[in-house]
Amino acid sequence: MDASREAVSVWSYGLAAFVYAAFAIYLASGWRSGLRSRALFVVSVLCAFWGLAGLAFALTGQTIFLAIGMLADLFRYGGWFVFLLVLLKPHASREGRVPNRLRWLAGIALALVLIGLSAQILAVLGTKTFFQPLRLVILDSLAMAVFSLVLIEQLFRNVSPDWRWSIKPLCIGLGGAVLFDLYLFSDSLLFSRVDVDAFNIRGFVHALVVPLVVVSAVRSKDWKTRIVLSQRATLQSVTLIAVGVYLLFVSAAGYYVRYFGGDWGRAFQLALLFAALLLLGVLSLSGSMRAKFRVLVGKHFFSYRYDYREEWLRFTNTLSSQDGFSEMGKHVINGLADMVESPAGALWLKDPTERFFAQAACWNMPVSSATEDADSKLCQFLLNSGWVINLEEYRSLPRRYDQLELPLWLIEVPNAWLVVPLATGSEMTGFVVLSTARTKIDVNWEVNDLLKTAGRQAGAFMGQMQATEALLEARKFDAFNRMSAFVVHDLKNIVAQLSLMLKNAERHRDNPEFQQDMLMTVEHSVERMRQLMMQLREGATPVDSPRGIDLGDVIRRIQTAKAGQGRHLELDLIDKAIAKGHEDRVERVIGHIVQNALDATENGGRVWIRLERQGDHAMIEVGDTGHGMSPEFLRERLFKPFQTTKPAGMGIGAYESFQYVHELGGKISVDSAINVGTQVSLLLPLFDSGVGTESAQIREEAK
């Protein structure tokens, strides 16, 4: 055997061993009870062993492997006999009894196997009889091939017409391989020699039976519970077989070129090999070629074109892989386009005003500024019917679409093919325009149903994303409104302070002390308004980190400010305390509580502040003998925004104070009674007791 023929034999039997071994492993991994499943598994194992023996003989050339391969071939035929008889039994039996005809067939099959086994034993032992054992082996192999055709004919003729569609691929594949063996053994018997070329490619011929057996198993209702092959696996198998056929053809062509090319034969062979591999790479990377293979497999190998589980998981993963609302549109287009092998598409979504649809995303399609009114004929047709508009069908049979009129912009979209509505409930959130597919696809009921269902899911996703975006935007406005409310509250206090100053200006404008106090008040108001503007620009959270605050100094400044307004504030500073916080905000919180106490207390009543330390906290108590608050107000309304007992109050100050104190890790508690008074206890964490005491001592010494 020369090198080229040896290579063909190795590839041929190696492919047979691999295919049958893989099929046997697949059957074993999904093992189910049943005679048919077990018989098919045994046949696959025997065929894989036969392929391995042929591969070993092609690699080594030792006759021992040839003898093992002949023995494996005998048992392989016996396995196919059993499998065909098992398939034939339910259709040939009546009332649960096996007819005599089937018994005779089983007996003939057993006799052929035993005769072949005896002949091979005699041939191995070299026993001389009145006949040649090797010739008897070939004769028995020829008889088994003929008997296999008889069983295949009986099976195909006796099955019901409904089941014949399922069994047809098996009969075609196995019958073709048996016919090849019939030629090989007939030629060997007539001319007393083996056709080497036919023998070398025999493994490849029998490997082609496996895909057809799988198709029959998938089609058969009785086998579907035992063999379930996905479209992806079938596509990969078909692709592998196609590549194998292509490579065998290239090998044969290369052998022919080298044999007849003379001195230039090897150069032509290398050129042919390079061109063939280059073409194979181009075809492998071609999206159109992959699309054609997928359509071919879905159309001719399965009852339904799509593997719905795989399609739904892939589409859901595509939608879930978005990186924000801007990328969501492209993922929707890609998911729908992959279902129909479309290379491009664009998405139109409803405007926030809900008056028209505008392009929100595009993929391999030009950007369009065209809009479509929400009450146009196109949108109303998509909403009312829920159909997927096939523009090719519309051009040929417009009556099917109930006198639908397409807008001019849609007609001008290059290669526009399908319009898929995206709906959620009774509303349409948008639609997708897909371009013509890479290969010819029949848009039947199955394609329409899949696109409509996927469009509903995509519409729900888009609606959810839009609602999420609207919620985030509303939260941003809510945060800004809350911050604005705090600022307005502080502005109200500043306005009240300036109004009081202007009220007293008529009487004390010539008083130098009042003028000095007025300048200080205006300066303080300007500085406070500048801080409010910065707060609006940078956010409600202070930029700087909390620092140590001498609460005694803060309380004394508040007393001085209130005295300037004509109100007396009693102080009881028991301990010196350095609290953690932002000085201006802490002063505003305490000042707000003091101002509320003053507002609730008539002239002649008492308002006091007491400061002391309690462990790691500073306790500030603000008390008054004013009107007080009801238990219901304390329980349900206090420290909530826009809740107040003041006729002109806004209900923001207490809420802001409560939020800030809790941010610092402090606590506010209130004890109040109607017409008795109120005590507000404010606990603030100390900044650092040791450092705070030393700082206070240093300041006292400096004074």
Image (tube, rainbow, N blue to C red):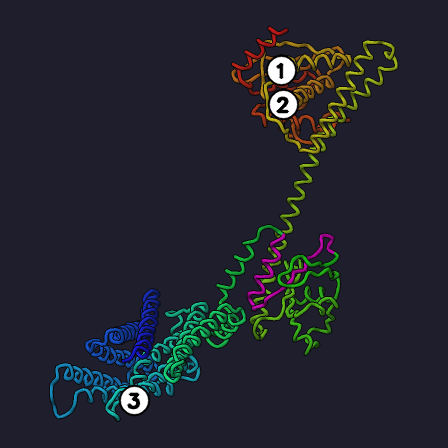
For image coordinates 26% across by 92% down, the residue present is 191
Q: CA distance from mark 1 to mark 3?
A: 109 Å
Q: Which residue is mark 3?
A: 146
As drawn, is 610 to the left or to the right of 595? left
Q: Earlier in the sequence, mark 1 or mark 2?
A: 1
Q: Residue 148 in the image: state x and y as whole percent.
A: 30, 85
Label 1 vs label 2, nearer the camera: 2
As drawn, is 104 to the left or to the right of 204? left
Q: Nearer the viewer, residue 270 or 176?
A: 270
**Mark number for residue 582?**
2
For image coordinates 83% across by 9% down, the residue present is 512
Q: CA distance from mark 3 to mark 2?
A: 101 Å
For image coordinates 65% across by 41% down, the residue present is 475
Task: Report the magenta residues as a range.
Answer: 326-354
The vertical placement of 471 against 575, above or below, is below
How would you rate the neighbour count of disc 2 (Cα within 10 Å): few for under 14, some for 14-19, many for 20 or more? some
Q: Amino acid at mark 1?
A: Leu
The vertical placement of 128 against 401, above or below, is below
**Mark number for residue 551?**
1
Q: Amino acid at mark 2?
A: His
Q: Nearer the viewer, residue 378 or 17?
A: 17
**Quarter placement of the C terminus:** top right
